[in-house]
């Protein structure tokens, strides 16, 4: 099958969150199981790996807003699959990837340029896999073109929702500027008097997917549907949940190049040495028997940071360490820095993002905290499982699907989870984890349960192939 994956971000070229991880890993996984998959993504000012690029198209004339935009296209296989990076300096050479008043125009252009590029290279894809609101424009364009161009007649679209909260809303009066002038196209976008690129993708793609089974159900509720739950319920027979995979070429404690010590489920001694390295990194007293609770996340309300604020003093009262890596809301940043200043012998704080340190925290910590308000999929809990670090999570979205509550009676389960968004419920699970940690054999069983699970991208890619086949049936 010939598959084009289109995404606003993709590792290793660009990343702000889980979307980048998924879009970077999926095309490679699809190729590894025998399919002709390639990726199209913007070339930002921040895009990494210039030494691995070469020019694919020096001049790509994109019909845009009544004229021609002279784009350029670079080519790379730094992510393990053919990747085309669309270079349009006026749209993508910015200080940050998102956050501009005309983001809707930037990504409308990107979609149109991506389809222009696809036409230039070989036969039409069997599947165009679109990701989040940034690519809703292409879903509408392909649905429209199928009736007018033979090239697209047999192409089907899959639209993946990574986070429904972001919908790409803009003034509907601008649709004509981007070439969407028919009643069909306008109706696809219209939502409460405005235009929504997310709604456009949801309403016109042949199949819909999201990044966990549970999030697929949650999106159809008023509480979690962000005004589009009615549309998701209407198209529920086209909506499927597929949990993201983990790129084990990057996240594998046996081979991770970011770690000072490697280890496996057969020999966990290296994990203890990584714990030593992590404590040393934060200038904390080296006591390898005291547990480390860790968090690596964006400091936003979505991630349930207020629950961590409420329980962290109880954690420290047990004598445990607490380590956090993240940035975001200034009030959260200030809280954690004050915590570090108050209890410097138990707390390590890194404000910002540091990929190498994120790997060391996963390897050196004992428990990982993810009390999210909502979590479409989540990746850190799966990294934690692979690294023998026990996740303590709220049972929502992908956290519900991947973390199974530990049962001390039969030894089943791989972590601890609570349902209600309440600090006391969170703290109960923290204490349960501490009781398990105090029993080395029980703790090792928990670690091995998690490290034995298959969250590989190969497994996820095969499920996507089934979805693509449904789209074409």
Image: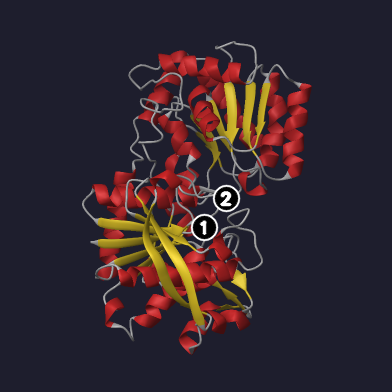
Residue at horizontal 50%, vertical 50%?
A: 47
Residue 156 is at least partly visible in this image:
no
Near-viewer residue (159 or 320): 159
Residue 349 is at least partly visible in this image:
yes
In-image side of 130 versus 164 (left or right): left
Near-viewer residue (44 or 12): 44
Can you tell which quarter of the image residue 207 is in? bottom left
Q: Residue furthest front?
A: 58
Residue at horizontal 44%, vertical 38%?
A: 382
- Give the number of the disc on residue 218: 1
In-image side of 290 versus 74 (left or right): right
Q: Which residue is mark 2?
A: 374
User: Dot 2 lies on which element?
Assistant: loop
| Residue 166 location (% of width, % of height) | 58, 61
| Residue 232 location (% of width, % of height) | 48, 68
| Residue 46 location (% of width, % of height) | 55, 49
Q: Earlier in the sequence, mark 1 or mark 2?
A: 1
Dot 1 and dot 2 residues touching (CB under 8 Å): yes
Near-viewer residue (215 or 196): 196
Q: Is residue 180 above or below residue 334?
A: below
Q: Quadrant of the N terminus?
A: bottom left
**Mark 1 against mark 2, which lies toward the viewer?**
2
Can you tell which quarter of the image residue 269 is in? top left
Mark 2 surroundings: few (<14), some (14-19) or many (≥20) residues within 10 A: many
Residue at horizontal 35%, vertical 35%?
A: 453
| Residue 28 location (% of width, % of height) | 32, 48
In-image side of 299 versus 161 (left or right): right
User: Dot 1 lies on which element?
Assistant: helix
- Give the number of the disc on residue 472: none
């Amino acid at each position: 099958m010939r598959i084009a994956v289109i995404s606003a971000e993709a590792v290793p070229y660009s990343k702000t969150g889980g979307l980048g991880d998924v879009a970077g890993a999926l095309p490679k996984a699809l190729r590894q199981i025998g399919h002709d998959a390639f990726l199209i993504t913007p070339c930002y000012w921040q895009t990494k790996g210039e030494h691995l690029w070469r020019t694919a198209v020096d001049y790509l004339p994109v019909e845009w807003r009544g004229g021609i935009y002279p784009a350029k296209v670079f080519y790379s296989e730094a992510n393990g699959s053919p990747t085309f990076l669309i270079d349009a300096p006026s749209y993508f050479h910015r200080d940050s990837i998102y956050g501009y008043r005309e983001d809707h125009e930037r990504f409308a252009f990107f979609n149109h340029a991506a389809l222009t590029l696809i036409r230039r290279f070989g036969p039409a894809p069997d599947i165009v896999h679109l990701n989040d609101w940034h690519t809703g424009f292409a879903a509408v364009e392909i649905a429209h073109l199928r009736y007018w161009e033979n090239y697209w007649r047999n192409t089907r679209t899959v639209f993946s929702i990574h986070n429904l909260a972001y919908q790409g809303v803009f003034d509907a009066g601008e649709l004509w500027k981007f070439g969407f002038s028919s009643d069909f196209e306008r109706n696809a976008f219209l939502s409460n008097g405005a235009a929504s690129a997310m709604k456009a993708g949801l309403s016109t793609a042949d199949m819909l997917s999201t990044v966990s089974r549970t999030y697929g159900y949650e999106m159809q509720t008023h509480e979690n549907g962000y005004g589009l739950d009615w549309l998701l319920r209407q198209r529920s027979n086209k909506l499927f949940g597929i949990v993201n995979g983990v790129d084990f070429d990057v996240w594998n404690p046996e081979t991770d190049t970011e770690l000072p010590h490697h280890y496996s489920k057969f020999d966990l001694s290296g994990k203890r040495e990584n714990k030593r390295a992590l404590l040393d990194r934060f200038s904390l007293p080296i006591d390898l028997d005291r547990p480390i609770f860790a968090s690596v996340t964006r400091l936003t309300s979505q991630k349930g940071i207020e629950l961590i604020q409420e329980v962290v003093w109880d954690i420290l009262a047990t004598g445990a360490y607490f380590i956090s890596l993240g940035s975001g809301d200034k009030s959260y940043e200030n809280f954690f820095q004050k915590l570090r200043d108050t209890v410097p012998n138990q707390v390590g704080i890194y404000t910002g993002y540091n990929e190498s340190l994120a790997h060391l925290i996963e390897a050196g910590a004992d428990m990982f905290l993810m009390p999210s308000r909502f979590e479409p999929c989540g990746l850190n809990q799966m990294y934690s499982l692979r690294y023998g670090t026990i996740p303590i999570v709220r049972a929502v979205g992908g956290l519900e699907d991947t973390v199974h509550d530990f049962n001390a009676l039969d030894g089943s389960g791989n972590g601890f989870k609570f349902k209600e968004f309440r600090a006391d419920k969170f703290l109960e699970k923290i204490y349960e984890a501490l009781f398990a940690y105090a029993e080395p054999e029980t703790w090792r069983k928990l670690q091995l349960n998690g490290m034995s699970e298959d969250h590989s991208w190969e497994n996820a890619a095969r499920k996507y192939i089934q979805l693509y086949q449904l789209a074409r049936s």
